[in-house]
Amino acid sequence: MASKVESSAARERRDAEAVPTRTCVGCGRRDASAALLRLVMLEGEVAFDLAGGAFGRGAHVHPIAECLARAPRGLARSFRCSVSTDASELGRRLVAACDRRTRGLLLSAHRLRAVAVGAEATARALPAALVVVAVDGGSVGDGSRHTALGEAIAAGNALVWGTKEELGVLFGAEGVAICALSHQGIAQELKWARAARDAGVTAAREGAECSSRFREAR
């Protein structure tokens, strides 16, 4: 029995060691690389490599506003060069990168025919789908009008992104207020991109507020 326990513990250690880890330039803590955002230098500018396809030396940061706020100080050490960015700018770049990533993921889901477009099609796809509601979708995003939609929102299986026009362009329609994704892998990546975007928005706002207070103090 003891040998089995020891064997199981050994396997767990090997599994843990096999998981790639990286150090966050914000908090300095090591974590699984999958839990961090990768940054690279492109043409002398810091950029987020959310798709993971960029070559070259990279740095990593948690998708948390506090880590993003501290990241600029650690980027110069990681890239071994001068880095001209602050928390506010880093937050804005993350928001833009997340929007690009979201568009790409939605297009991929559409090509795979894993998107149900419109209120009726979305209702039929629930509950096994991620709901995406346009920011100007109006009452279509009111979960109280549909029990399954309300449950999806309560379970954190719904997100708000883009306008009806933006979603319509992606899906070849005049305007899309709501849709549902049945591809679980893409749905998880969309949730990750949305959470990272929220952190970017917070970092951009708080960075701008800190900069404004600094100027006033001077």
Image: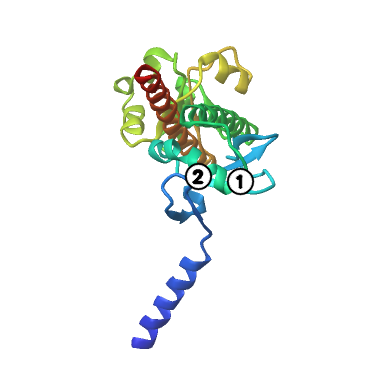
Horizontal relation, residue 214 to residue 95: left or right: left
Image quadrant in which you'd find residue 195: top left
Q: Percent position (x, y) of residue 141? A: 38, 20
**Secondary structure category for the residue under label 1:** helix
* Tag 2 residue: 74
Q: What's the residue type where badge 1 is placed?
A: Phe
How packed is label 2: few (under 14 Cα within 10 Å), some, or many (20 or more)?
Answer: some
Q: Nearer the viewer, residue 123 or 142?
A: 142
Left or right: 202, with 183 as reference point: left
Q: By what rule are the colours in the image chosen? A: rainbow
Screen quadrant of the N terminus: bottom left
Write down the residue under mark 1.
79
Q: CA distance from mark 1 to mark 2?
A: 9 Å
Name the residue located 44 percent from the left edge and 44 percent from the top edge.
26
Q: Position of residue 47 (x, y in %)?
A: 60, 35
Residue 12, percent from left and from top: 43, 71
Q: Position of residue 129 (x, y in %)?
A: 45, 36
* Quadrant in which the C terminus is drawn: top left
